[in-house]
Image (cartoon, rainbow, N blue to C red):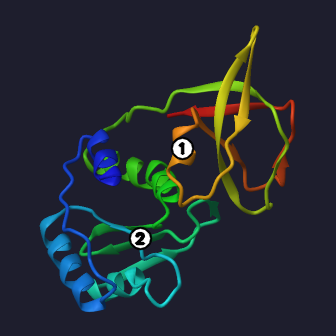
Amino acid sequence: HTIAAMVETTGCIPKSFGIAKDNFEEQLHLAQQGIHGCDVLIFSAGSSVSTRDMTADVINALGEPGVLVHGLSLKPGKPAILGVVNDKPIFGLPGNPVSAMIVFDLIVSPTLYHLSGCIKPPMNTTTTATLSLNIASAAGREDYIPVRLESQGEETFAHPVFGKSNLIHTLSYADGLIQVPLDKSGLYQGETVKVKLF
């Protein structure tokens, strides 16, 4: 329901094909229905590398070229999949809700706007704030950290909301996201950060 609601925010019409079991044939059957009946195909979950995660295999079985990218230098959202079949874009979102929502916002949403002919898609509102804690990150990976904003006098502070990416309530406590760029190994307390508001 969350992904369908996010699709609607772009002006597109979501079409659900239900929940597939951990069975390759069933997943492929539903994916074939999707690729023939839709302009874009979005898988939710099954993008990681365990034996039950078959999304990449299903996409490759749909046709050429299939999976183009499997894994992003992104946290959360590393196991995401990007593919193309019959000139239609296919996205494999991670099963963890926070990861899925962030990948959708960063990659899927701009693609949907572009395909629907939107020349100037709406931009997320941003604000600046002072970071209240140090945040460690691995260089070479783009991190997105949920933050809660708090005004103290004339200054606004961004408090990191730490939590696992499988817990959607992590985002319910946050007002937005801050980005740790690929070339940085973290952000420092007292630093001015740009907050992408929800």
Q: Are marks 2 and 1 in contact (CB under 8 Å)?
A: no
- Return the residue at label 2: 45
Q: Label for residue 18?
A: none
Query: In the image shown, does 39 or 13 lie closer to the viewer?
Result: 13
Q: Is residue 126 left or right of residue 45?
A: right
- The quadrant holding residue 183 is bottom right
**Residue 83 image offset from top left, x and y in percent:** 39, 73
Crowd tier of the residue under label 2, counting other residues whose Cα lies within 10 Å: few below 14, some 14–19, many 20 or above: some
Amino acid on which the number 1 mark rests in the picture: Leu
**Residue 166 image offset from top left, x and y in percent:** 53, 61
Q: Is residue 77 left or right of residue 154?
A: left
Amino acid on which the number 2 mark rests in the picture: Ala
Furthest residue to the top? Answer: 153
Cα separation, mark 2 vs mark 1, equals 19 Å
**Residue 134 image offset from top left, x and y in percent:** 85, 43
Query: In the image shown, does 178 or 35 lie closer to the viewer?
Result: 178
Image point 38% across, 88% down: which residue?
Answer: 57
Crowd tier of the residue under label 1, counting other residues whose Cα lies within 10 Å: few below 14, some 14–19, many 20 or above: many
Query: In the image shown, does 39 or 97 lie closer to the viewer?
Result: 97
- Return the residue at label 1: 171
Image point 21% across, 53% down: which residue?
Answer: 14
Label 2 or label 1, whichever lies nearer to me, is: 1
Q: Is residue 140 left or right of residue 68?
A: right
